[in-house]
Amino acid sequence: MTPAGREHETSPSAPPDFGAAGLALTDVVIPNDLRSAKTVADRIVAELARLKYDDDCAFAVKLSLEEALTNAIKHGNRNDPAKRVFLRFRVDPQRAIIMVRDEGPGFSPQDVPDPTADENLERPNGRGIMLMQCYMSKVWYNSTGNEVWMLKNAGETLP
């Protein structure tokens, strides 16, 4: 469990129901730059608004998506313009499901320093994964550590 009590886990594949019949996912590939990341994030946030997600829920998805995309671009792909970022998502009235994958070597989420530890409190970065885990209903990583799946249930309150 995360500090906020949300679940996260490392698993070799996406949660089983994400690819199930009747749950069509949209695939998008973007260049490895923050401008492209903003464009696709805005597209997903617009879909949340169209489906009347409340402001808190939309904020949680937007923040988590921006963190995942930034991590993929800067840390996974190391700002390499030759690399790409892959997204797979679905937004429906019940939930938002988002996958972000980079072309980097991956990492182990368990090895990321705790941003709430005294020695890390004044660091200007290192809170993205914690924010994703706090604001999303569930977060999964593949075994390589270069792919994250996030689920947000509609109407779920923020921590």
Image: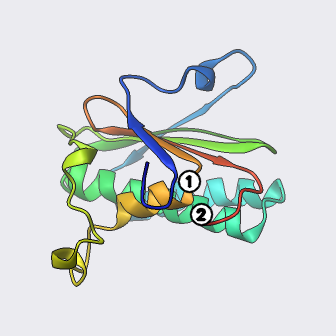
Q: Are marks 1 and 2 in contact (CB under 8 Å)?
A: yes
Label 1 sits on a secondary structure element that is: loop
**Residue toward you, 102 or 147:** 147
Image coordinates for residue 103, horizontal then vertical, percent: 26, 38
156 in relation to 59, above or below: above
> Percent from the top left, x then y, of residue 126?
27, 67
Q: Residue at x 54, y 44 (%)?
A: 138
Question: Which residue corresponds to the image point at 25% horizontal and 31% vertical from the top-left?
Answer: 144
Where is residue 148 drawn, in percent x and y? 41, 41
Q: Amino acid at mark 1?
A: Met
Label 1, label 2: how far apart the Cα atoms are: 7 Å
In this view, the residue in front, 132 or 38, is 132
> Can the viewer see residue 53?
yes
Vertical arrangement, residue 120 with respect to residue 103, above or below = below
Which badge, 1 or 2, is on the more N-terminal residue? 2
Q: Which residue is mark 2?
A: 60
| Residue 91, quarter of the rendered image | top right
Q: Residue furthest bottom?
A: 122
Taking the image as drawn, is residue 81 in sight? no
